[in-house]
Image (spheres, rainbow, N blue to C red):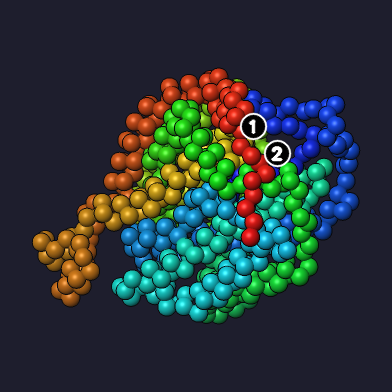
C-alpha cells in the first residue's frame, strides 16, 4: 500500500488524448477535433528494452524495503531491546508520508536534464553513498554494548528510506511515459515483480546467505565459520550498484520532454486539491476508521517474529516461513479477484476481522508452549513447525484479503477526475496507522514487561544498573509478566471495540451515493489548472 503513488495514476489519466475531464466522470469524446485515434497494438515492439529497464528500476526500488524488513531480525538476534526496535522502526516512516513531497518531485524539474532523470540520478548517487557509509560502520552499530548504537543506524536508514520513497515517486511517474499506451498495463507487472524480487534480495538473501548455520547445513560440503556473504560486504555491493545505476541512467537512458497533458497538476494546485479532498465528510469518516484500523492487529503483525526467536525458533526458520508467506502474497490477489468485484466485498472485509483477531490467541498459545515443544524433538518438533507455519500463512491470508479489498474499495470511491492523488491520500490513512502502531507496539512490549531479580525481591530489573547489580549478586532477572501477552490482550480488546464501532459507519460509506465522494460537484469554477507546472 505504501508504494501506491498519485503520480502514476494521474499520468494514466492525463496521458490519453481521447478523454476529457468532467466534474462527474471521465467521458470519451468520439467526434472531437482534438481527439487522436489510438490503434490497438497487441505486441511489445519498441518496448521490450523499456520493460527490462523498468523492471531493473523497480528491483532497485525494492531492495531498501527488503533491508528494512531484515534489520529488525538482525537486531533481535543481537539481543537489542524492543525499545531499540521501536526507535529503528521510525526509519520506515518516509514511505507513509511521501505524499507530502510527491507534488514537488512531480512538478519541479529542469527541462535540459530531464523531468525524471533530474531526480533519479542524484537519488541513486545519494542512496549508494549512504549504503557505502553504512557498510563501514554497520558491524559497530550492531554490537549491543549498552550504548545507543541504534541511533546512528536509525538516522542513516531514515535518510535511505527517504531517498527510496523519492525513488518510488519518480519511477512510478516515469513508468507512465516510458511505455507506449497500448503497453502501459505492463508497468504494474514490472512494479509488483520488480519490488518483490528487490525485497527478496534485501531480506531473504541477506539473512540466509549471511547465516553460518544455514550455509553450513544447505550450501557447503564442510563446515566453515561465517556465512557466504557478510552484512558489510552486501551493503557495500549494493552501494556500488546504485552508483553504477546512476551513471547508466544518466548516460544511456533518453527522456522525452513532457507534453502539456503530461505535466500534472502543479505544486500549489496539488496541495489545494489534497485539502479539498480531506474536507469531504466521507473522507473524514473513512480517515478516522483507518487511522485506527491497526490497533487490534499491530502486536501480532509486528512483534510475533521476534517473540518466537526469543523463545528458541531460529532466525533461519523465521526467514523460511517469511518466504512461504511471500508466496501467499502472490497467490491471494489472483484468487480473490471475484470478491473484489462483488458488491459485498466490504462484508468479506468485516468477516475477516474476527478471524484475524483470533490469531492473537493462536500465536500466544503456540508461543507459550514453544520452549517445551522444541526440546522434545522428532515428530513433535516437526508438528510444531507445521502448526507454526500454518498459523503464519492463515494469518497472512486474512491480512492480505483485507488489504486487497481495501485497495479495491478506495479505487472504487476515488473521484475519477483526480484518481491518483485521491487514492494515495486514502491509502495514506492506513499507512499512518501501520507506522504509528508498529512503533508503539514495539515500545510497549518493554513497558508492559515486569521482571524481578532471583536474589532480591526488591530489584525489579527496570534499569541497566539494576540488571548489572542483580548479575553481580549471582542472580538473574526472571520475567513475572511478559509484555507480549499483556499487549495481545489489550490490543485484542481494543480491536473488538474498534470492530463494533466501525461496522455501521463503514457499511454506510460503502453504500453511500457516488456523488458524495466527488471533490467538485458541478462547480466548474473550482477545477484545477492541470498545466500549472513549476520549472527551474
* Front residue (pair 502, 309): 502
The residue sitting at 79% across, 38% down in the picture is 17
Residue 233 higher or lower than 409, as above or below: below
Q: Which mark is residue 13?
A: 2
Quarter holding the N terminus? Answer: top right
Q: Position of residue 528 (x, y in %)?
A: 61, 37
- State left or right for residue 271 relative to residue 169: left
The C terminus, quarter of image: bottom right
* Residue at position x 32%, y 35% in the image: 493
Does residue 323 show up?
A: no
Residue pictured at 71% horizontal, 72% vertical: 247
Asked if disc 2 and disc 1 are in contact, CB closer than 8 Å, the reply is: yes
Q: Which residue is mark 1?
A: 416
Q: Residue at x 29, y 56 (%)?
A: 446
Q: Is residue 242 above or below residue 346?
A: below
**Residue 159 vs residue 104, the one in the foreground:** 104
Q: Residues within 10 Å of mark 1 (few under 14, many from 20)?
A: many
Amino acid at each position: 500500500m505504501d508504494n501506491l503513488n498519485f503520480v502514476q495514476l494521474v499520468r494514466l489519466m492525463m496521458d490519453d488524448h481521447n478523454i476529457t475531464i468532467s466534474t462527474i466522470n471521465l467521458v470519451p469524446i468520439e467526434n472531437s477535433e482534438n481527439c487522436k485515434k489510438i490503434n490497438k497494438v497487441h505486441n511489445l515492439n519498441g518496448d521490450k528494452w523499456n520493460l527490462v529497464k523498468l523492471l531493473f528500476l523497480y528491483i532497485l526500488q525494492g531492495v531498501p524495503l527488503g533491508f528494512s524488513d531484515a534489520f529488525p531480525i538482525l537486531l533481535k538476534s543481537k539481543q537489542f531491546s524492543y525499545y531499540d526496535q521501536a526507535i529503528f522502526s521510525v526509519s520506515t516512516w518516509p514511505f507513509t508520508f511521501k505524499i507530502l513531497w510527491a507534488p514537488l518531485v512531480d512538478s519541479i524539474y529542469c527541462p535540459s536534464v530531464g523531468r525524471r532523470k533530474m531526480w533519479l540520478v542524484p537519488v541513486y548517487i545519494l542512496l549508494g553513498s549512504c549504503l557505502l557509509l553504512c557498510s563501514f560502520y554497520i558491524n559497530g552499530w550492531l554490537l549491543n554494548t549498552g550504548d545507543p548504537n541504534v541511533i546512528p543506524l536509525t538516522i542513516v536508514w531514515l535518510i535511505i528510506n527517504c531517498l527510496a520513497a523519492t525513488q518510488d515517486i519518480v519511477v512510478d511517474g516515469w513508468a507512465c511515459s516510458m511505455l507506449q499506451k497500448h503497453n502501459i498495463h505492463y508497468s504494474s507487472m514490472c512494479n509488483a515483480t520488480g519490488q518483490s524480487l528487490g525485497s527478496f534480495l534485501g531480506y531473504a538473501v541477506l539473512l540466509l546467505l549471511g547465516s553460518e548455520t544455514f550455509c553450513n547445513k544447505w550450501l557447503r560440503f564442510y563446515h566453515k565459520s561465517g556465512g557466504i556473504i557478510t552484512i558489510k560486504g552486501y551493503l557495500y555491493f549494493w552501494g556500488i550498484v546504485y552508483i553504477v545505476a546512476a551513471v547508466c541512467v544518466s548516460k544511456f537512458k533518453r527522456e522525452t520532454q513532457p507534453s502539456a497533458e503530461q505535466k500534472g497538476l502543479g505544486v500549489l494546485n496539488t496541495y489545494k486539491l489534497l485539502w479539498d479532498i480531506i474536507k469531504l465528510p466521507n473522507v473524514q469518516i473513512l480517515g478516522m476508521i483507518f487511522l485506527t484500523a491497526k490497533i487490534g492487529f499491530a502486536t501480532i503483525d509486528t512483534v510475533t517474529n521476534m517473540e518466537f526467536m526469543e523463545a528458541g525458533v531460529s532466525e533461519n526458520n523465521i526467514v523460511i516461513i517469511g518466504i512461504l508467506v511471500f508466496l501467499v502474497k502472490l497467490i491471494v490477489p489472483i484468487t480473490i479477484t471475484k470478491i473484489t468485484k462483488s458488491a459485498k466485498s466490504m462484508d468479506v472485509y468485516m468477516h475477516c476481522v474476527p478471524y484475524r483477531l483470533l490469531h492473537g490467541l493462536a500465536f500466544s498459545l503456540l508461543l507459550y508452549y514453544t520452549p517445551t515443544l522444541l526440546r522434545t524433538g522428532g515428530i513433535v518438533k516437526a508438528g510444531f513447525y507445521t502448526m507454526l507455519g500454518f498459523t503464519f500463512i492463515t494469518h497472512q491470508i486474512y491480512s492480505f484479503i483485507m488489504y486487497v479489498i481495501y485497495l479495491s474499495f478506495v479505487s472504487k470511491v476515488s473521484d475519477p477526475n483526480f484518481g491518483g492523488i485521491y487514492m494515495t491520500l486514502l491509502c495514506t490513512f492506513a499507512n499512518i496507522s501501520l507506522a504509528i502502531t508498529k512503533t508503539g507496539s514495539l515500545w510497549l512490549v518493554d513497558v508492559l514487561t515486569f521482571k524481578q531479580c532471583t536474589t532480591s525481591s526488591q530489584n525489579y530489573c527496570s534499569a541497566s544498573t539494576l540488571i548489572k547489580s542483580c548479575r553481580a549478586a549471582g542472580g538473574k532477572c526472571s520475567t513475572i509478566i511478559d509484555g507480549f501477552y499483556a499487549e495481545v490482550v489489550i490490543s485484542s480488546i481494543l480491536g473488538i471495540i474498534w470492530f463494533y464501532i466501525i461496522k455501521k459507519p463503514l457499511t454506510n460509506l460503502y453504500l453511500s451515493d457516488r456523488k458524495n465522494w466527488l471533490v467538485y460537484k458541478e462547480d466548474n469554477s473550482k477545477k484545477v489548472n492541470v498545466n500549472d507546472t513549476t520549472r527551474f
